[in-house]
Image (spheres, grey):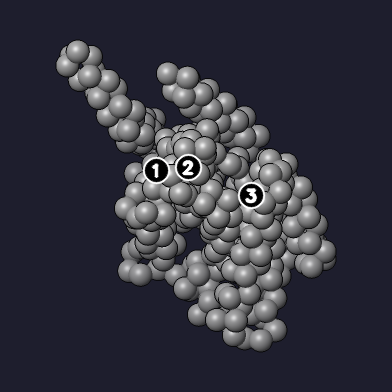
């Protein structure tokens, strides 16, 4: 009996650590294949950190959503609309604080609407956020008139995207800081335990006194605010906003979170794992580019990763 228990504990431990092995394996693979193309150079590694910052931040919010057994497909369009609203207000008023507050408020309003429709009206989150995605994307196209909006505020661009603190990109600082906060929130607080309990067994969570609807509203709100912040950081990094921002991130973020060990069925999530998943996706993209693969081939590869990741998640759930 004790032997069986030990074997099960080893299996659980392996599943928790597998993302770290995959991360190291991917780095080792591309280090060997692209040794002569500067894959391990400091500039290339910092470039990967910049490229993955926004998807890593979005993955933090998505970790909470998937941990409750829900999903959000509207966050890509939230990125675009938030970046556009932030940039427009910044250019018209010159106030960085007002622009940031308005940009985050866009995400908060959309997230609250998603949460209320899911939790209070019992509409599946897939359908709610799919419809919301169309609404928000339409607003982004309408508000921007399909035009790019430049940012000319150097302080804003330094703090929210393109600045460096010594050799370290400020986007990397944003990513690490928010990952630490997200990890502590999910793993070390009563709120995080309620999130995981909601996704693990909604009925049991309700009988234990957890207000499940409120938890679902809160994770939808959190996810949209994180997407709005990612949109603001996109504006700072690219020195402008456009309605196409975020449109290619949905698949990457969901893949990163699933690869990182968060279950689509809820009850299990890891913010640190999601960060590693986002870095893995960034390293894969960077490596494939250096190897000469086209954008179309990269999209095919990412799609395959999502299918395999979901298959493994479902297999583990059945076990």
What residue does disc 2 label? 207
**Residue visible at 68% across and 44% down in the picture:** 122
What residue does disc 3 label? 119
Q: Quadrant of the N terminus?
A: top left
Q: Nearer the viewer, mark 1 or mark 3?
A: 3
**Residue visible at 48% across and 55% down in the picture:** 57
**Residue visible at 57% across and 26% down in the picture:** 307
Residue 249 tag number: none
Q: Position of residue 284 (x, y in %)?
A: 47, 37
**Residue placed most toward the observer, 17 or 196:** 196
Q: Quadrant of the C terminus?
A: top left
**Residue placed most toward the observer, 35 or 221:** 221
Q: Residues within 10 Å of mark 2 (few under 14, many from 20)?
A: few
What residue does disc 1 label? 270
Is residue 86 something that shows in the picture?
Answer: yes
Q: Is residue 238 above or below residue 96?
A: above
Q: Is residue 103 above or below residue 112?
A: below
**Residue visible at 61% across and 77% down in the picture:** 99
Query: Of callouts 2 and 3, which one flags the residue occurring earlier in the amino acid sequence?
Result: 3
CA separation in Å, label 2 and label 3: 17 Å
**Circle 3 SS class:** helix
Outermost left residue: 2
For this view, does 32 lie left or right of residue 112? left
Q: Nearer the viewer, mark 2 or mark 3?
A: 2
CA separation in Å, label 1 and label 2: 25 Å
Q: Residues within 10 Å of mark 1 (few under 14, many from 20)?
A: many
């Amino acid at each position: 009996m004790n032997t069986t228990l030990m074997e099960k504990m080893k299996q659980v431990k392996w599943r928790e650590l597998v993302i770290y092995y995959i991360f190291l394996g991917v780095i080792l693979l591309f280090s060997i294949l692209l040794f002569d193309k500067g894959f391990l150079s400091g500039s290339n590694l910092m470039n990967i950190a910049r490229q993955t910052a926004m998807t890593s931040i979005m993955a933090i919010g998505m970790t909470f959503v998937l941990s409750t057994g829900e999903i959000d497909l509207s966050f890509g369009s939230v990125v675009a609309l938030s970046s556009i609203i932030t940039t427009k207000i910044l250019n018209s008023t010159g106030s960085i604080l007002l622009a940031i507050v308005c940009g985050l408020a866009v995400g908060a309003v959309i997230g609250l609407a998603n949460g209320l429709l899911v939790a209070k009206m019992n509409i599946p989150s897939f359908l709610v956020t799919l419809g919301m995605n169309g609404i928000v994307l339409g607003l982004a196209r309408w508000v921007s008139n399909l035009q790019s909006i430049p940012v000319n505020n150097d302080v804003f661009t330094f703090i929210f995207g393109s600045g460096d603190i010594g050799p370290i990109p400020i986007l990397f600082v944003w990513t690490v800081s928010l990952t630490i906060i997200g990890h502590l929130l999910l793993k070390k607080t009563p709120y995080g335990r309620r999130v995981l309990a909601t996704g693990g067994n909604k009925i049991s969570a309700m009988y234990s006194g957890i207000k499940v609807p409120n938890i679902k509203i809160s994770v939808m709100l959190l996810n949209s605010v994180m997407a709005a912040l990612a949109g603001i950081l996109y504006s700072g990094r690219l020195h402008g906003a456009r309605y196409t921002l975020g449109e290619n991130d949905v698949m990457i973020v969901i893949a990163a979170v699933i690869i990182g060990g968060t279950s689509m069925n809820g009850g299990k999530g890891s913010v640190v794992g999601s960060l590693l998943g986002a870095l893995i996706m960034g390293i894969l993209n960077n490596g494939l580019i250096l190897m000469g693969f086209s954008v179309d081939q990269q999209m095919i590869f990412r799609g395959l990763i999502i299918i395999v990741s979901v298959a493994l998640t479902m297999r583990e759930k059945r076990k």
